Amino acid sequence: MRYLIIGASAAGLAAAETLRQWDPRGAVTLISDEPHPPYSRPLLTYLLSGEVSLEKIWLKGADYFREWGFEALLGERVVQVAPGDREVRLRSGRVRPYDRLLIASGARPRLPGIPGEDLDGVFTLRTLADWRRLESGLNGVREVVVVGAGAVGLKTADALAQRGFAVTLLARGEQPLSRVLDPTAAAMLMDAVTALGIGLRCRSWPVALDGAGGKVDRLTLNNGRDLPAQAVIFSVGVTANVEFLEGTGLGEPGGILVDRHLRTRVPEIFAAGDCIQPHHLLTGEQWPYHIWPAAVDQGKVAGANLAGVGRSYPGLLPQNSLSLRGFKVIFGGLGPHDTGDCESVAVMDRSRGHYRRLAYRQGRLVGLTLVGAVADAGIYFQLMSQRLPAPEPVTPGRLWG
């Protein structure tokens, strides 16, 4: 059996290793458009801050592919999948046939489509190449603007502030993480961001970038004012890498649609990771989510199913954590905008800077926010992921001893 996996990051690696356990003799080939061994994308902001060294981000050793019996085509970009011919075509001109295919091609940063995006000094941070380009572009920079106050934007802003840059963070909404944090948790986050020396501007976004000599030196904001910057980093979301699926009917704008076995509309083609629209564990709706541990879990299911095992993916439970030096927040399940019909319990311990919000629907926990005291997060996520009946909603007096 010839197995082909497009992508050698979280989902692709988990799939390949799981597949090898079920089929020790199958021919497994991984294709990656990056020329180096796999690495941890979540560590890129820590690499930017200097908290970890380059040597610490590698996921696998130099002999990984040989030891597992995988063929690795690194630095190769897929330009077309031809399901009728059961082959994948590469930019280099090579053609690789397959019996079963996994698409784990991930996603790439999205830009807002405004004038000046092509100026020098404009960056994203998604790949190791992005980090290297950003590092080389920071020489002589004083003022940096990070556009987008999601988790990656917040971590990027903090990393640069730790290095002494004057950092401004732009949030399009009234608060950072507006889809997942209620106003109380968001206010605590905003206070922490300000305390870190980051200038936070809400309801602000750029409408144009400008500069002299082809290099950015300012942004024009939606309120008409200019903001000086010698470097601009966009963190405004990602787009699934599915352009090579044109004409196949598989590549939806938001990512590949899959069934509960992570199979596409073509029976011998599966998909996993940031390029798909998985089912939400609690609602059943399909939507693109970009969460590293979820990509790993999907890869394990897809890898087993490539070998014909027939596993089901129960669905993705959104969850994320954010640590900005001493400030910690964990959130997951349904966000505050999706729990209007739920019973919610929220309590603040101002003396310790702790906040907890739990949302219940029909006796089951469906939403969680923890600020400060996050040690119990695993227990709550287990309750949600297994859809277990939760204990009676906890009263404020019993949340902390």
Image: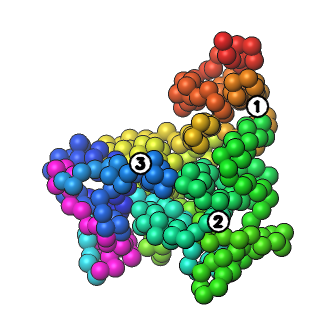
Secondary element at tag 1:
loop
Amino acid type, label 1: Cys
Mark with earlier residue (1, 3): 3
Q: Is residue 92 above or below residue 16?
A: below
Measured as percent of width and height from the top left, residue 306 is found at 31, 51
Q: Residue at x 23, y 47 (%)?
A: 20
Give residue 143's mark. 2
Mark 2 or mark 3, which is nearer to you?
A: 2
Instruction: Give the image quarter of residue 114.
Output: bottom right
In this view, the residue farthest toward the bottom is: 213
Residue at disc 3, secondary structure: loop
Q: Hey, what amino acid is under mark 3?
A: Val
From the viewer's perspective, tell me whether residue 134 is left or right of residue 93: right
Magenta segment: 64-92
Mark 3, residues whose alpha carbon is within 10 Å: few (<14), some, or many (≥20)?
A: some
Which of label 1 and label 3 is nearer to you?
3
Residue denoted by label 3: 52
Mark nearer the N terminus (1 vs 2): 2
Quarter of the image where the C terminus is located? top right
Which residue is found at the position 55% from the left and 25% from the top?
A: 375
- Which residue is labeled 1 in the image? 342
Question: Contact (CB < 8 A) between labels 2 and 3?
Answer: no
**Nearer the observer, 206 or 136:** 136
> Which quarter of the figure is the N terminus placed in?
bottom left
Please provide percent x and percent y for residue 133: 46, 70
| Front-lying residue, 330 or 2 | 330
Q: Residues within 10 Å of mark 1 (few under 14, many from 20)?
A: some
Label 1 and label 3: CA atoms lie apart by: 41 Å
Side of 178 where 281 appears, left or right: left
